[in-house]
Amino acid sequence: MENLQKIIQEAWSNRDLVKQANTQDAIRAVIEEVDKGRIRVAAPVVGKWVVNEWVKQAILLYFSIQPMQTWDVAPFEFYDKMLLKKNYKELGVRAVPHAIARYGAY
């Protein structure tokens, strides 16, 4: 995890690094960890919410590397950079019509 944090912080300071495949892999790895609930953007610490800045930075960098895509979910159409979450039943999540959760939400 420390290696991911280092890569993200370096990329945040030097945006040219975002073009590198290993940096993009690290960004996507952080998003997957957030999606699985293994790391959080913010967490309660002694009664206060503390932001994990490097995770927040990874999310913002993710938007810069993801292309816009169209998803057709009849009768609706979506155009976004984040995938839509799937498999609600397997995740134990109740989703009512027209509920939406993006990939990376836990």
Image (cartoon, rainbow, N blue to C red):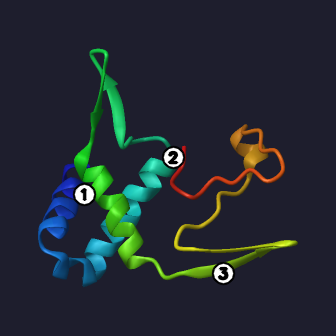
Q: Foreground mark, 3 or 2?
A: 3
Q: Which residue is mark 1?
A: 4
Q: Which mark is residue 70?
A: 3
94 vs 47, left or right, is: right
Cβ–Cβ under 8 Å for marks 3 and 2: no
Residue at horizontal 38%, vertical 68%?
Answer: 62
Structural crowding at the residue carrying mark 3, measured as other residues with C-alpha within 10 Å and reported as few (<14), some (14–19) or many (≥20): few
The CA distance from mark 2 to mark 1 is 16 Å
Q: Which mark is residue 36?
A: 2
Quadrant hosting residue 82? bottom right
The answer to which of marks 1 and 3 sits earlier in the sequence is 1
In the image, residue 56 sits, relative to residue 28, either above or below, namely above
Secondary structure at numbered mark 3: strand
The CA distance from mark 3 to mark 2 is 24 Å
Residue at horizontal 35%, vertical 37%?
Answer: 42
Residue 37 x, y percent position in the rendering: 48, 41
